[in-house]
Image (cartoon, rainbow, N blue to C red):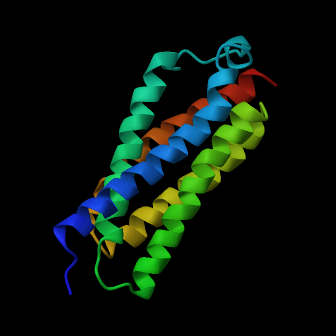
Amino acid sequence: MARSRRSQFLILIASIIICQLAGVVGSIFTTPAIPTWYAGLNRPSLTPPNWLFAPVWTFLFLLMGISLFLVWRKSQPTARRRLALSIFAIQLVLNVLWSLVFFGLRSPLGGLIVIGLLWVAILLTIVSFWKISKTASVLLLPYILWVSFAAILNSYLWKLNL
């Protein structure tokens, strides 16, 4: 039985809110560290300006929310869908954990370890979503590209600030 339009809309809103909340929680650890600890780090020349991170992450969390919706909205829960949603949840937790470890604990090495796990979890999410919704999978490509770039930055920050 197909879900109603209202039900679909509520799933879309919930999906976007869940992902945006992950960004809000991560910012709790990030924001206070930017003008203090992070400002004092040696940074590579390829580091984007600080103002760029918030809009990029907001957009990426929006794409994640739409992607989540496309998988979550399927009317018949299956083992494949449950697994895909579980992997998605793991990558979302790892996303927040990176902010906690890198900024909250001020640990570039710990952040590098977490971002490596995050990258793998995003890749697994893309693969598992592909089997359910190709569009949902493709919507996560900018996310894995940005996290790849962030991992490179993280590794430079670790090396430059030993």
The structure residue drawn at horizontal position 21% and vertical position 65%, both measured from the top left corner, is 6
What residue lies at 79% left-to-right and 35% top-to-bottom?
A: 105
Would you say 10 lies left or right of 96 here?
Answer: left
Quadrant of the image occupied by residue 156: top right
Vertical position of residue 144 compared to residue 43: above or below: below
Residue 66 % position (x, y): 31, 55
Tell me the residue at 64%/17% (across/down). 43
Instruction: Say whether residue 132 is visible.
Output: yes
Q: Is residue 32 left or right of residue 27?
A: right
Q: Position of residue 152 (x, y in %)?
A: 57, 35
Residue positioned 45% across, 86% down in the render? 79
Rendered location of residue 59, percent (x, y): 36, 37
Query: Can see residue 137?
Result: no
* Residue closest to the far front: 6
Quadrant position of the C terminus in the picture: top right
The residue lying toward the viewer, choosing from 21 and 146, is 21
Q: How many marks?
A: 0
In the displayed structure, does residue 37 sit left or right of residue 122?
right
Please determine whether, in this image, residue 90 is positioned above or below residue 49: below
Residue reaching furthest to the right: 162
In the displayed structure, 118 sits above or below 44; it is below
State the residue in front, 22 or 46. Answer: 22
Quadrant containing the N terminus is bottom left
User: In the image, is residue 56 above or below residue 50?
Assistant: below
The residue nearer to you, when weighing 139 against 2, is 2
- Viewer-proximal residue, 94 or 147? 94
